[in-house]
Amino acid sequence: MAFYSYTPSGVCSKQIVFELKDGKLSNIKFTGGCPGNLAAISKLLDGADALETVKKLQGNDCGGRGTSCADQLAMAVALALEEQKK
């Protein structure tokens, strides 16, 4: 299982960490941001397929910012998947 840490941009959360094993996400944690919503996202995505998660969350906008914590998670997971291909 690989552990990843990502520093998001343009959102309230300051850090996203998660684990990725066999294409599945687990132990997703956000530092900062909207605690209730981000805790719910983390619970809903525990065990989820990483590629499907990227497809579902990519481009999600928060208040006209052009991104969101969910979108930033999608970016982080996409980077992790690319890294694992190497």
Image: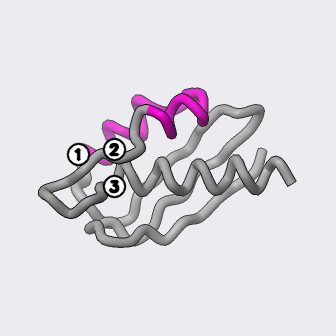
Residue underneath mark 3: 69
Q: How is the image coloured?
A: one colour
Gap in Å between the C-alphas at discs 3 and 1? 12 Å
Q: Secondary structure at mark 3?
A: helix
Magenta stretch, main secondary structure class: helix
82 magenta-colored:
no
Amino acid on which disc 1 is placed: Gly
* Mark 2 residue element: helix
Report the magenta residues as a range. Answer: 37-55
Q: Amino acid at mark 3?
A: Cys
In the image, which is nearer the foreground, mark 3 or mark 2? Answer: 3
Helix, strand or loop at mark 1: helix
Q: Earlier in the sequence, mark 3 or mark 1?
A: 1
Across and down, in percent, residue 53 comes to 50, 34
Q: Residues within 10 Å of mark 2 (few under 14, many from 20)?
A: few
As drawn, 48 above or below 16: above
Amino acid type at circle 2 is: Ala
The answer to whether the residues at label 1 and label 2 have Cβ atoms under 8 Å apart is: yes
Image coordinates for residue 39, horizontal then vertical, percent: 33, 44
Per the model, the C-alpha gap separating discs 3 and 2 is: 11 Å
Location of residue 11 in the rendering, given as x and y in whole percent from the top left corner: 29, 66
State the residue at coordinates (43%, 68%).
8
Q: Which mark is residue 39?
A: 2
Instruction: Give the mark nearest the N terminus, 3 or 2.
Output: 2
Q: Magenta span has 42? A: yes
Using residue 40 as the reference point, say whether residue 63 is left or right of it: left
Instruction: Name the residue that disc number 1 marks.
Output: 36
Task: Please tell me which residue is depicted at 58% across the width and 49% down the height of the picture.
Answer: 77
CA gap between label 1 and label 2 equals 5 Å
